[in-house]
Image: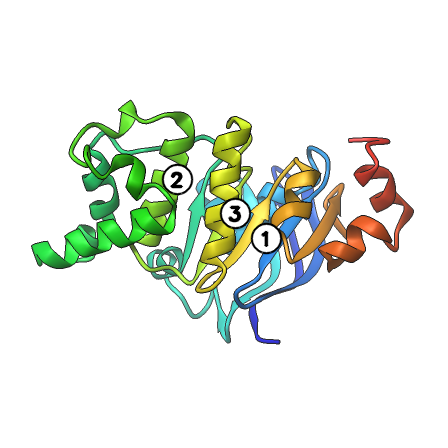
Amino acid sequence: MVVKIRTENLSANFDGVTVLKGINLQVEEKEILGIIGPANSGKTTFLKALNRMNELVPNYKIKGKIFLDSFDVYRDLRILALRRKIGMVFAMPLPLPFSIFENVAYGPRLQGIKNKKKIEETVEKCLKASYLFEEVKDRLHSPAFNLSGGQQQRLCISRTLAVEPEVILYDEPCSGLDPISTAKVEEAMRELKKKYTQVLVTNNTKQAARVADRTAFFLMGELIEIDTTANMFTAPSDKRTDDYIAGRFG
């Protein structure tokens, strides 16, 4: 087992309200870690702490440590370098007001890549990785906003891949998608596992059961338990986990 991300006694609060309480958790390389739990359990705050996006919120304070490989993300990595290594896909697709092609090419261009052929290869590779290329290959230069919601979400995954991250974070990426689009996003996630470490926050326990290798259950800012997904969904060690998965609360 190779540990890609590790948190040590990670706590966070906003305006003095504690949202995370001493989280100790490891994410293994090239796994999909699912994070489940009811609303206000700290799932998204934890996710955004990993690439320091919470720092955009006023009055946010954090204690403890987060490591990416052997690097302390607060002491050893600048924010822009960290976010290139840890990309994020949000609940609502957020395509840029450009063409499909330019959405994916945007990151490489920002990194200074000017070679036209290399950019074209990158765009095609990333669109294929998100299972979108065959659907858009004849309209790459049409506006991204013309795509369906599910296609826009896969485009956002392609855009994230284009800057060659090591980790991809997903914050409820299928919450607004129909079942067919959800299935395509999940298929892309399973394929991306060959190369990337992925962390998926989802309110859909069935989705975690389908795609996650391990699952963590958060409740009121605490990590209640973490286990293989098979164990979590058949024999959880904590009754609160069992109650949540069974739909008795949440």
In the rendered structure, the answer to whether residue 46 lies left or right of residue 69 reads: right
In the picture, residue 246 is in which quadrant? top right
Task: Classify 10 Å Cα crowding around label 3: few (below 14), some (14-19), many (20 and above).
Answer: some
Q: What whole-number distance in Å separates the C-alpha atoms at marks 1 and 3?
A: 12 Å
Q: Counting residues from the N terminus, which is met first, the one under dot 2 or under dot 3? A: 3
**Amino acid tagged 2:** Arg
Q: Which residue is mark 3?
A: 48
Task: Classify 10 Å Cα crowding around label 1: few (below 14), some (14-19), many (20 and above).
Answer: some
Give x and y (percent) for residue 49.
54, 51
Q: Which residue is mark 2?
A: 154
Q: What whole-number distance in Å separates the C-alpha atoms at marks 2 and 3?
A: 20 Å
Q: Residue at 73% of width from left, 46% of height from top?
A: 218
User: As displayed, is residue 55 above or below residue 135?
Assistant: below
Q: Indicate the secondary structure of the residue bearing disc 1.
A: strand
Q: What whole-number distance in Å separates the C-alpha atoms at marks 2 and 1?
A: 32 Å
User: As displayed, is residue 36 above or below residue 25?
Assistant: above
